[in-house]
Each structure stands twice: as structure tokens, then as C-alpha cells.
Image: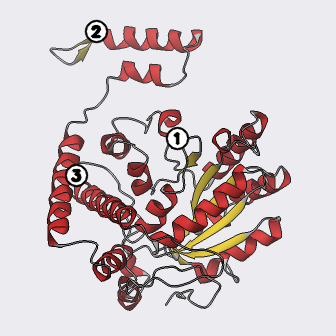
């Protein structure tokens, strides 16, 4: 069974039972309205994930990478993102994508194969999903260095500053690209926060085989601070991410956050976790469910009633129906459109290819399906 991380310097502000606890360096100033909104975002993020898995099983999309169990890591981190910040995701950050305004159809189109995941990342402040494991950390570091060159770091006016939040998983920490990103970020004091969602399994490889020390301790070897946070505690994740991002915005360089969480489902819908992990391990982590602990917190404070949950359930059902409908509305693009998606400004050689393709397509007899 994977370690539970409880005795390894992990920042926790909300217990699995929904009780607030003190921490010497971090705190959450209780705001019931804020907690209710974060609960709502986690519930909708989980519903989107459930719908994505179901759509794959029904043959509507080709693949789906579940986030089940990691909702607090993503929603808590999203709460610490300011308007000028930039987020670089892997391919599993569905909840933070929704929090930052990416439409479900924009994400589903990638997995349905009708688009290439090409939402406007500058408008959303959320980069495109990255399939090459760890490559986004180098992109994030380069973007962060660009912020420095643009004078958007270390200004006395907070609104002029920005930082980058780069997601990756525990498996990606073994990749060369990720470690190179750490080196560049440290060398140039780039305003980037590396947010590692340690969900205990890199597909079938346990974290205990990947690293002999806790992942957050690796940061010290690169020359920047590392911190472990309870990734199922949305309050603690928000507090720690806000600290790291503000530190980066002020020009104090990179930081590493290890969000200690658990992947309740499969790595992707092509994976069968029962082949490599025990059911008892999953049952152990169910007791740490990020959504249930916020529900318990709000219940203890009498900050919600049954009407709140009835309304939330209805919103989730309506959202699920909208997701299913949006997916089925996604149609295959015409091949000629692909040429317009390569560059912001068309090039002569690409124009030539488009013309050659158009000529080739027109050479077919559409009615008979034969080539003339």
C-alpha cells in the first residue's frame, strides 16, 4: 500500500472528518461562501469526469484520462491563479480547466478527434493539453522567463505581476524534460511553480519505486523550495499554491508543490488498475475523499442545508446532460480546414499544399465514390 504521507511534513488544514486544524505556516480564513463554491466546482469537475468515462465506454470518444480523487488539488490550485497568470496542464486537469472557463466541448473535441484541443490559451490563461509526458514544464519555464523579459515580475504594484503554474504528475518527475525545466527555472529564477499531483501511480509503477525520498525533497537539490500538501484538502492546496505563486510573482524564483493525492480510477480508460494495485488501497483512500470532507466541514458549521444539495445535484445532472449533448454535436472537420490550424498566418508552402489537396479531393466522383 502507498504511504499516506501523514508524518512527512505534509500541510493539512482540513481533516478527512471535516475539521479545521492549525498549521504554523499556513491557514485558511474561514469563508463559507468560498467553501461552498469550491465544493460546487469539485462536484461539477467530478461529474464531467464521470461523463467523460461513460462517453468513452459508449464509443463517443476514443480515450479518457480520469481525474477521480484529484478534484481538490485542481480546484484549490485554480483558486490561487490570478488574471495575468498562466497555467500549463498535462492532459488530466479537467477540473481546473472548467474553473478557468474552458468549455467542456473544447476538451471533449480532443478526445473525440474532431479538433486538436485548440482553445484560446491566452484568453483562458490555460495552455493546451500536452500528451508528451512532461514537455509542458519546459514550455512553462520558457513562458515564465518571457514574463521576466516583459517586466511582469517583482513590480511594487501587485497587478503588474504574473507567474506560471505548471502541472505534472509523479511519473513525469522521472522524465528528462521535467528535470531540465527545474534546472532552467532555478538558474534564471523563473517565476514558475511546479505543481506535482502525486497520485501514487505512474500508470502501473508505484511512487515508492520511482523515488527513494519524498518528491518535494528533490526540489532542494535544484536550488528552490519544495513543499508537500494534502492534495485532498482544498483549503491547504489553495493556501500553499497562493504562497508559492505570490513568491514567484515577487521575483523570488520557482517552487515545487507536491500535492499528495490518489488516483481513484484508472490511468486512462485503456488501463485496468486491478491488475497492479490492491482493492484495499483504494478503499483506504476513499476515506480521504476531497469532496466528502468539505461536505462534512460545511455540515459541521450548519453552512448548508438539504436544499443546497438538492440544487447542487440538479445542477450536476443538468451539466451532465449538457456535456453528453455537446459531445454528440461535435462533428468531424473537413480535411481542408486542417491547413488553417497550423499557423496563425498562412505560409506560401502550406497554401500550396492546401491547393494541391483541394485539387485532389475534387478529382473524386462524389456520387459514385470513384476516382477520375
The quarter of the picture where the C terminus appears is top left
> In 3D space, how far apart are the residues under numbered discs 2 and 3 (Cα atoms)?
35 Å
| Residue 96 higher or lower than 43, as above or below | above
Dot in front, 3 or 1 = 1
Disc on res. 125: 1
Against 165, residue 149 (above or below) is above
Q: Residues within 10 Å of mark 1 (few under 14, many from 20)?
A: many
Q: Are marks 3 and 1 in contact (CB under 8 Å)?
A: no
Which quarter of the picture shows residue 302? bottom left
Cα distance between the residues tagged 2 and 1: 48 Å
- The image quadrant that residue 12 belongs to is bottom right
Instruction: Measuring from the top left, give residue 349's x and y in whole percent.
Output: 58, 12
Residue that appears at 53% across and 51% down: 89
- The kind of secondary structure element at disc 2 is loop
Residue 53, position as x, y percentages in the image: 28, 60
The x, y position of residue 352, in whole percent, is 52, 9
| For discs 2 and 3, the disc positioned in front in the rendered view | 3
| Nearer-N-terminus badge (3/1) | 3
In the image, residue 25 above or below residue 324: below
Q: Between 296 and 341, which is closer to the camera in this rendering?
A: 296
Q: State the residue at coordinates (43%, 73%).
A: 263
- Disc 3 from disc 1: Cα separation: 31 Å
Q: Tell me the residue that label 2 is attached to.
A: 372
Crowdedness of circle 3 by 10 Å Cα count: few (<14), some, many (20+)?
A: few
User: Where is residue 51 shown, x and y percent of the image?
Assistant: 24, 57
Name which of mark 2 and mark 3 comes first in the sequence.
3
Callout 2: few (<14), some (14-19), or many (20+) C-alpha neighbours within 10 Å? few
Which quarter of the figure has residue 279?
bottom left
331 and 221: which is toward the camera: 221
Residue at the spot of label 3 = 59
Amino acid at each position: 500500500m502507498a504511504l499516506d504521507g501523514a508524518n512527512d511534513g505534509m500541510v493539512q488544514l482540513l481533516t478527512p472528518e471535516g475539521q479545521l486544524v492549525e498549521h504554523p505556516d499556513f491557514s485558511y480564513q474561514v469563508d463559507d461562501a468560498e467553501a461552498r463554491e469550491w465544493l460546487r466546482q469539485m462536484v461539477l469537475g467530478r461529474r464531467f469526469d464521470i461523463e467523460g468515462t461513460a462517453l468513452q465506454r459508449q464509443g463517443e470518444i476514443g480515450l479518457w484520462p480520469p481525474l477521480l480523487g484529484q478534484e481538490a488539488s485542481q480546484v484549490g490550485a485554480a483558486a490561487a491563479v490570478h488574471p495575468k497568470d498562466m497555467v500549463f496542464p498535462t492532459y488530466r486537469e479537467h477540473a481546473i480547466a472548467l474553473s478557468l472557463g474552458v468549455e467542456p466541448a473544447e476538451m471533449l473535441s480532443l478526445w473525440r478527434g474532431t479538433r486538436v484541443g485548440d482553445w484560446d490559451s491566452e484568453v483562458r490563461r490555460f495552455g493546451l493539453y500536452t500528451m508528451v509526458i512532461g514537455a509542458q514544464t519546459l514550455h512553462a519555464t520558457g513562458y515564465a522567463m518571457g514574463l521576466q523579459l516583459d517586466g511582469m515580475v517583482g513590480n511594487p504594484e501587485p497587478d503588474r505581476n504574473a507567474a506560471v503554474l505548471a502541472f505534472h504528475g509523479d511519473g513525469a518527475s522521472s522524465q528528462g524534460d521535467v528535470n531540465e525545466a527545474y534546472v532552467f527555472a532555478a538558474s534564471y529564477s523563473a517565476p514558475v511553480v511546479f505543481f506535482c499531483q502525486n497520485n501514487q501511480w505512474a500508470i502501473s509503477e508505484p511512487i515508492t519505486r520511482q523515488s527513494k525520498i519524498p518528491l518535494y525533497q528533490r526540489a532542494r537539490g535544484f536550488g528552490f523550495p519544495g513543499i508537500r500538501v494534502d492534495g485532498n484538502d482544498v483549503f491547504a492546496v489553495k493556501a500553499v499554491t497562493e504562497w508559492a505563486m505570490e513568491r514567484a510573482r515577487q521575483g523570488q524564483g520557482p517552487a515545487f508543490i507536491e500535492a499528495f493525492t490518489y488516483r481513484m480510477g484508472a490511468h486512462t480508460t485503456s488501463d485496468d488498475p486491478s491488475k497492479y494495485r490492491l482493492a484495499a488501497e483504494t478503499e483506504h483512500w476513499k476515506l480521504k475523499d476531497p469532496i466528502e470532507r468539505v461536505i462534512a466541514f460545511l455540515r459541521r458549521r450548519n453552512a448548508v442545508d438539504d436544499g443546497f444539495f438538492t440544487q447542487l445535484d440538479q445542477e450536476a445532472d443538468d451539466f451532465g446532460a449538457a456535456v453528453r449533448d455537446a459531445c454528440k454535436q461535435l462533428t468531424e472537420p473537413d480535411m481542408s480546414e486542417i491547413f488553417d490550424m497550423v499557423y496563425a498566418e498562412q505560409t506560401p508552402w502550406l497554401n500550396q499544399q492546401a491547393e494541391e489537396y483541394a485539387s485532389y479531393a475534387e478529382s473524386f466522383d462524389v456520387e459514385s465514390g470513384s476516382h477520375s
